[in-house]
Image: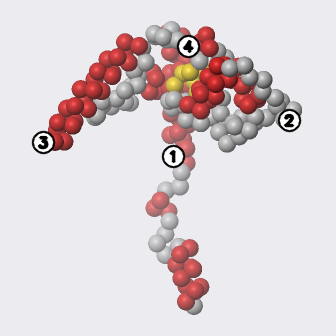
Amino acid sequence: MYTQRMFDMWSSVTCKLEAHANNLGQSNVQSPGHNNSSGSIKAQIEIIPCKVCGDKSSGVHYGVITCEGCKGFFRRSQSSVVNYQCPRNKQCVVDRVNRNRCQYCRLQKCLQLGMSRDAVKFGRMSKKQREKVEEEVKFHKAQLRAQSDAAPDSSVFDTQTPSSSDQLHHNYNG
């Protein structure tokens, strides 16, 4: 009884949020049991990695598909007068691991990719933009499938091969 009431309450809240998000053109809220395979563009965009650092993206921010970290970094870089300096030759690698090492190069990469305070969009994507995103989503889904197909099969590991803990136990006792 209690779980049914909680489920009904959750469904009611998510339906209201879904309706509100749809009004904003940014549906990303899923109700329990909702299949996301043909979900919203925003949900599909999240399969594309962040264009700045390659981390898991969370949507289109300031006109570019980015993660939450790069979105926040760009927002902070625009909200105050900053004068970042590169300690190297202005050719730093900006990836998930190194993105916090050089603010200058990270900001330059954001700007080169087209991030802009003016690029905050409300409403729908144009057909051309949507087609481009859908093609990129297909590409990344194919990459993920290829990676999972190339992963070693767990049945390959033979039970006769001693594990490292078995080997340690044998060496310790033997």
Q: Residue furthest right?
A: 89
Return the residue at label 2. Answer: 88
Tell me if mark 2 has few (under 14), some (14-19) or many (20+) residues whose alpha carbon lies within 10 angstroms of its own.
Answer: few
Return the residue at label 3. Answer: 1
Closer mark to the observer between disc 3 and disc 1: 3
Q: Which mark is residue 9?
A: none
Q: Which mark is residue 149?
A: 1
Report whether 140 appears left or right of 115. left
Closer mark to the observer between disc 1 and disc 2: 2
Q: Residue at x 52, y 12 (%)?
A: 121
- Give the percent coordinates (x, y) of residue 68: 55, 31
- Give the percent coordinates (x, y) of residue 2: 16, 42
**Inter-mark Cα distance, 3 to 1:** 43 Å
**Which residue type carries mark 1?**
Asp
**Which residue type carries mark 3?**
Met
Choose the circle earlier in sequence order: 2 or 3. 3
Question: Residue 38 versus residue 149: which sits nearer the camera?
Answer: 38
**Inter-mark Cα distance, 1 to 4:** 38 Å
Question: Residue 56 versus residue 136: which sits nearer the camera?
Answer: 56
Choose the circle earlier in sequence order: 3 or 4. 3
Mark 4, secondary structure of its residue? loop
**Inter-mark Cα distance, 2 to 3:** 63 Å
